[in-house]
């Protein structure tokens, strides 16, 4: 019997599909592992609670990260990306910028959530750092999941309504607290998914999708420290830095890489402080990475 469902969890080559509320353990045919959480898939039932993924429906968006050797799919068909940062511990600008570049390249709207605003002595500095991204046009939403959960819900629920969202953030930023607030039965769902995926009782390091009332979805990805973007070409990279846009096409050379070329409009903007030096340095680093690709 063939049917259609949504992939709600992935761990290695094991997937869990939700077909109208019924969950099936799934595998792919052969060695292909190009399935992502959020994918709509066509399944062929093989037993009571098991199925084979026959094919994947066309995706609206696909977010992934990659290193020199392979790419790792994070989620499919998402409309919004929320990067959770906090007043403490300090967050990595490199990771935030990489996530924003990945979202830009994938055509996904990106937002920042600044959590733990109750740590007042560290708030001004965190605000200033998050403000760098706010000034680029990415909305920054201030919340405190633990100190003021009602305000956090009132702030975030309207942003999630009608969307399929992914939350990413380094460990310690309070992403789990936010997910638990937004998805009341998240911990129960994780236990169910964990046993259904048969990954052992202690596995929480898998990406998973939760449905919200009204059909919206939240995808929670495990915390990661690295966000490789080896798959982005030079042309994709320069367009994924939103603040470069006004200057593209203004360079002397049409194939300018904006690294050391004479009369480069982007470098001039960096020199004039119109583009943050930190962001341009990351651009140069990503350009270097994209030249290292082996696959």
Image: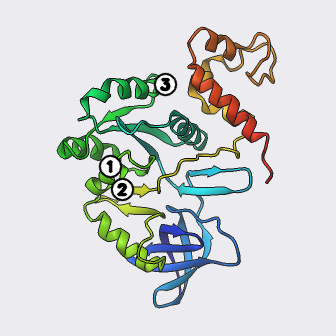
Q: Residues within 10 Å of mark 2 (few under 14, many from 20)?
A: some
Q: Which residue is mark 2?
A: 216
Q: Sequence order check: which comes first, mark 2 or mark 1?
A: 1
173 sits to left or right of 48? left
Task: Point out residue 15 in the picture as x, y percentages from the top left corner.
Answer: 53, 73
Secondary element at tag 3? loop
Q: Sequence order check: which comes first, mark 3 or mark 1?
A: 3
Which of the two residues, 212 or 284, is positioned nearer the viewer here?
Answer: 284
Q: Image point 25% across, 40% down: which residue? A: 144
242 sits to left or right of 264? left
Q: Which residue is mark 3?
A: 136
Q: Residues within 10 Å of mark 1 (few under 14, many from 20)?
A: some
Q: CA distance from mark 3 to mark 1?
A: 24 Å
Task: Point out residue 256 in the picture as x, y percentages from the top left corner.
Answer: 78, 22
Secondary element at tag 1? loop
Q: Which mark is residue 161?
A: 1
Q: CA distance from mark 2 to mark 3?
A: 27 Å
Secondary element at tag 2? loop
**Is residue 122 shown to the viewer in this render?**
yes
Q: CA distance from mark 2 to mark 1?
A: 6 Å
Mark nearer the viewer, 3 or 1: 3
Q: Residues within 10 Å of mark 3 (few under 14, many from 20)?
A: few
Q: Image point 46% across, 91% down: which residue? A: 48
Which of the two residues, 210 or 95, is positioned nearer the viewer here?
Answer: 95
Mark nearer the viewer, 2 or 3: 3
Q: Which mark is residue 47?
A: none
Q: Report if the CB atoms under discs 2 and 3 are less than 8 Å apart.
A: no
Res. 241 image quadrant: top right
Res. 291 image quadrant: top right
């Amino acid at each position: 019997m063939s049917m259609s469902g949504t992939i709600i969890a992935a761990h290695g080559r094991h997937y869990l599909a939700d077909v109208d509320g019924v969950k099936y353990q799934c595998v792919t045919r052969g060695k292909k592992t190009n399935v992502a959480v959020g994918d709509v898939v066509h399944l062929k039932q093989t037993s009571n609670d098991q199925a084979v993924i026959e094919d994947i429906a066309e995706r609206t968006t696909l977010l992934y990260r990659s290193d020199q050797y392979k790419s790792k799919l994070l989620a499919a068909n998402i409309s919004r990306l929320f990067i959770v940062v906090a007043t403490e511990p300090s967050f990595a600008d490199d990771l935030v910028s990489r996530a924003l570049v990945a979202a830009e390249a994938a055509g996904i709207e990106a937002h920042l959530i600044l959590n733990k605003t109750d740590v007042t002595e560290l708030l001004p500095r965190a605000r200033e750092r998050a403000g760098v991204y706010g000034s680029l046009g990415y909305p920054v939403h201030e919340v405190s999941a633990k100190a003021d959960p009602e305000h956090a819900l009132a702030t975030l629920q309207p942003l999630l309504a009608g969307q399929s969202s992914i939350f990413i953030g380094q460990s310690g930023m309070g992403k789990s607290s936010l997910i638990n607030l937004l998805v009341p039965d998240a911990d129960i769902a994780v236990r169910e998914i964990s046993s259904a995926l048969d990954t052992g009782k202690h596995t929480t390091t898998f990406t998973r999708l939760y449905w919200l009332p009204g059909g919206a979805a939240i995808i929670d990805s495990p915390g990661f420290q690295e966000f490789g973007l080896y798959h982005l070409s030079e042309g994709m990279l320069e367009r994924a830095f939103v603040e470069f846009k006004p200057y593209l096409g203004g360079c002397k050379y049409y194939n300018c890489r904006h690294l050391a070329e004479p009369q480069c409009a982007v470098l001039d903007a960096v020199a004039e402080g119109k583009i943050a030096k930190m962001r341009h340095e990351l651009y140069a680093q990503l350009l270097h990475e994209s030249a290292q690709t082996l696959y």
